[in-house]
């Protein structure tokens, strides 16, 4: 089989490494991939959102399965365009990807189908949103741009002035472009956060092992929000009882709600959950694997990933038994460029990796690297995800932190407290 993975970050590297364990795959391509991925797949210089070129490539190369990993091509309808030409895919079509593509859609869906989430209101005019915030007079309050905003579209306002500033920046100054034509203003929830990725074919939904992201740039959950600075799996706050409640009140109802709406979801639904004092609630849906959640979830998956992707494509996921390693733990620590998540330099030489971009002590998922004349260089904000598994979380973390010390590049930054909150549970 010839498989194409669309995207070029650490998540895609983790998917590719997992797929490579399947002997039926003869060729694995990545578009665009990155320096480290080029050691595991043939990188094709096509942007992840370039639908026309992607379709042409898949038809010419007779790709048997295209895995669409990032949010933007999914929301743009990459899956629909590939399917029209008879190319099989993994990932939701455009109608289903709206689950992530529009926060107004997802909030209205949860309200309509009574799926637990924060109370909210939707606005198309800044002055109406501001009057509402004034009337509510409860802080912090949460302001979200409707559309995709590179993971930055959520602002937690601590007071009225911050809230007004956020509403004006999103709606009048269009800091996230058209994504800010509508906003959601919602109740601030508290409690530990859990990420649950799930396989879904529209008939069956199978949650994967839970994980915990660390979104802020600095230790102690300080600093700016990032795409994620590290992850651990499983998440100790996601107990068996919580899992059962989520299955009954959130996961199955979400799949069924999408069916009811004529938007059957086939792919990975990512549930961003908060375990509040009043039970688990949905903070956000994503229509794809998380990054860097995938980097800790897939290393613990025992079932073949290609078999799962094919079963989802044929809507026979219910026939598979999907297993994860029991009593194993995984940790991923992100090495990022100086300045990330704001502006950062690129093209900085990375020291310490072997010629495959790996280390003996850990698996290195490349997020933002380029390979120039045999030398690995930085090419993104998040550069590497140093990942290890262990019989305890502590062991997995110690091994990952031991390994990251082998790697150096100018300005390299990483959090030294990944997993700390989980260990304290
Ligand atoms: P998102 O981009 O939707 O993942 O949101 C980014 C982060 O904002 C989440 O991981 C939460 O930490 C926080 N957040 C979003 N919505 C809420 C909420 N209603 N209450 C408290 N925190 C929230
Ligand atoms: N790590 C969060 C995300 O993938 O959106």
Image (cartoon, helix red, strand yellow):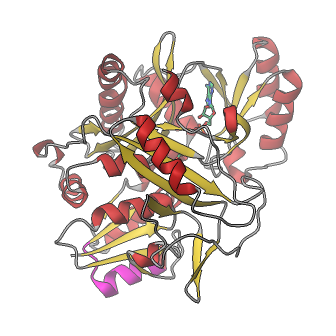
* Image coords of residue 1 (percent x, y): 21, 76
Q: Identify the magenta region.
A: 53-64
Q: Is 122 left or right of 236, judged from the image as shown? A: right
Q: Quadrant of residue 311?
A: bottom left
* Image coords of residue 126 (percent x, y): 80, 33
Q: Is 99 left or right of 159, judged from the image as shown? A: left
The dominant secondary structure in magenta is: helix
Q: Is residue 54 magenta?
A: yes
* Image coords of residue 324 (percent x, y): 25, 42
Q: Is 190 left or right of 130, judged from the image as shown? A: left
Q: Is residue 109 magenta?
A: no
Q: Residue farthest to the left?
A: 319
Is residue 292 visible in the rendered structure shown here? Answer: no
**So how many labels did they put on this image?**
0
In terms of depth relative to the viewer, which is nearer, 38 or 140?
38
Compared to residue 219, the image places residue 81 above or below, namely: below
Q: Residue at x 33, y 24 (%)?
A: 243
Q: Residue at x 84, y 38 (%)?
A: 168
Compared to residue 232, the image places residue 313 above or below, namely: below
């Amino acid at each position: 089989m010839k498989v194409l993975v669309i995207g070029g970050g650490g998540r895609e590297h983790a998917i590719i490494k997992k797929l490579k364990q399947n002997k039926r795959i003869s060729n694995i391509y990545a578009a665009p991939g990155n320096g480290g991925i080029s050691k595991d797949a043939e990188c094709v210089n096509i942007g992840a959102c370039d639908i026309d070129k992607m379709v042409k490539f898949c038809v010419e190369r007779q790709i048997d399965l295209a895995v669409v990993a990032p949010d933007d091509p999914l929301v743009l309808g990459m899956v629909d365009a590939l399917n029209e030409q008879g190319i099989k895919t993994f990932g939701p079509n455009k109608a289903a990807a709206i689950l992530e593509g529009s926060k107004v859609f997802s909030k209205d869906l949860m309200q309509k189908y009574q799926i637990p989430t924060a109370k909210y209101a939707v606005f198309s005019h800044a002055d109406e949103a501001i009057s509402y915030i004034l009337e509510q007079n409860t802080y912090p309050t949460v302001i979200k741009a409707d559309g995709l905003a590179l993971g930055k579209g959520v602002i937690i306002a601590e007071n009225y002035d911050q809230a007004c500033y956020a509403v004006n920046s999103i709606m009048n100054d269009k800091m996230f472009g058209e994504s800010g034509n509508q906003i959601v203003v919602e109740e601030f929830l508290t409690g530990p956060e859990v990420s649950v990725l799930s396989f879904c074919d529209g008939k069956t939904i199978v949650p994967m092992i839970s994980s915990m992201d660390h979104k802020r740039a600095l230790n102690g959950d300080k600093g700016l929000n990032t795409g994620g600075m590290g992850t651990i799996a499983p998440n100790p706050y996601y107990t068996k009882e919580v899992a059962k409640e989520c299955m009954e009140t959130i996961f199955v109802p979400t799949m069924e709600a999408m069916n009811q709406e004529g938007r059957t979801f086939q792919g990975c639904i990512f549930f961003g959950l908060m375990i509040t004092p009043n039970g688990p609630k949905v903070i956000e849906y994503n229509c794809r694997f998380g990054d860097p959640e995938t980097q800790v979830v897939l290393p613990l998956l025992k079932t073949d990933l290609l078999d799962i992707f094919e079963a989802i494509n044929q809507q026979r996921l219910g026939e598979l038994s999907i297993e994860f390693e029991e009593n194993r733990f995984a940790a991923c620590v992100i090495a990022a460029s100086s300045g990330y998540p704001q502006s950062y330099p690129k093209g900085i030489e990375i020291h310490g990796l072997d010629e495959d971009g790996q280390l003996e002590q850990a698996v290195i998922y490349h997020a933002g690297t380029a390979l120039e004349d045999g030398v690995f260089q930085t090419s993104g904000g998040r550069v590497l995800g140093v990942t290890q598994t262990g019989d305890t979380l502590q062991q997995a973390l110690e091994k990952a932190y031991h390994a990251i010390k082998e790697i150096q590049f100018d300005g390299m930054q990483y959090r030294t407290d990944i997993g700390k909150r989980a260990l304290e549970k």
